[in-house]
Image (spheres, rainbow, N blue to C red):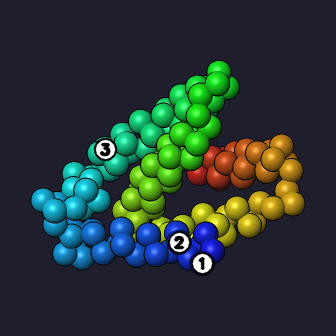
């Protein structure tokens, strides 16, 4: 099984836990976060991102690098809850990453700035 299959399987479980799909906030952590709304899962994403940074800093000073994997898994999981809430999937993220392959990160950032500027200017005319 490849990573994309694993992500798709987890995304399907998260989708099934949405309150509108019968998920029970009393019985499911995912349902509870989705039921509470974006503030709940966005807060968790922030917390998990901080924990990734802390695990990496610890690894730089002799700590167990494997902890980075655990924290990134938590970050990805909570990010997938956000994706589901907004009607998006891991496949959407993978497609965006595939689109970026072969594009310089510096070039990509510059292109996004130009696109944002054009949208802003277009909205003011």
- Image quadrant occupied by the N terminus: bottom right
* Residue that badge 3 annotates: 39
Residue at image position (53%, 28%) is 54
Camera-side residue of 60 and 17: 60
* Residue that badge 1 annotates: 1
> Distance from label 3 to label 1 (Cα)?
34 Å
Q: Residue furthest left?
A: 26
Give the total number of marks visible in the rendering. 3
Q: Earlier in the sequence, mark 2 or mark 1?
A: 1
The kind of secondary structure element at disc 1 is: loop
Compared across the picture, whether 2 is left or right of 105 comes to left
Q: Position of residue 84 (x, y in %)?
A: 40, 65
Residue at image position (36%, 40%) is 43
Compared across the picture, whether 73 is left or right of 110 comes to left
> Distance from label 2 to label 1 (Cα)?
7 Å
Q: Which mark is residue 6?
A: 2
Q: Earlier in the sequence, mark 2 or mark 3?
A: 2
Q: Position of residue 91 (x, y in %)?
A: 58, 72
Residue at image position (63%, 29%) is 59
Residue 80's place in the image compared with 43, above or below, is below
Determine whether label 2 and label 1 are within 8 Å by CB.
yes
Residue 102: image quadrant is bottom right
Residue 68: image quadrant is top right
Residue 31's place in the image compared with 37, above or below, is below
Q: Tell me the mark number nearer the camera, choosing from 2 and 3.
A: 2
Q: Position of residue 113 (x, y in %)?
A: 73, 44
């Amino acid at each position: 099984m490849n990573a994309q299959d694993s992500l798709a399987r987890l995304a399907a479980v998260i989708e099934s836990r949405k309150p509108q799909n019968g998920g029970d906030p009393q019985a499911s952590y995912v349902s509870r976060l989705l039921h509470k709304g974006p503030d709940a899962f966005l807060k968790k994403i922030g917390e998990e991102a901080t924990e990734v940074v802390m695990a990496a800093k610890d690894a730089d000073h002799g700590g167990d690098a494997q902890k980075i994997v655990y924290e990134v898994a938590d970050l990805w999981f909570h990010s997938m809850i956000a994706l589901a809430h907004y009607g998006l999937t891991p496949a959407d993220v993978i497609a965006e990453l595939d689109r970026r392959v072969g594009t310089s990160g510096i070039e990509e950032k510059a292109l996004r700035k130009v696109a944002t500027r054009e949208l802003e200017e277009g909205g003011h005319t």
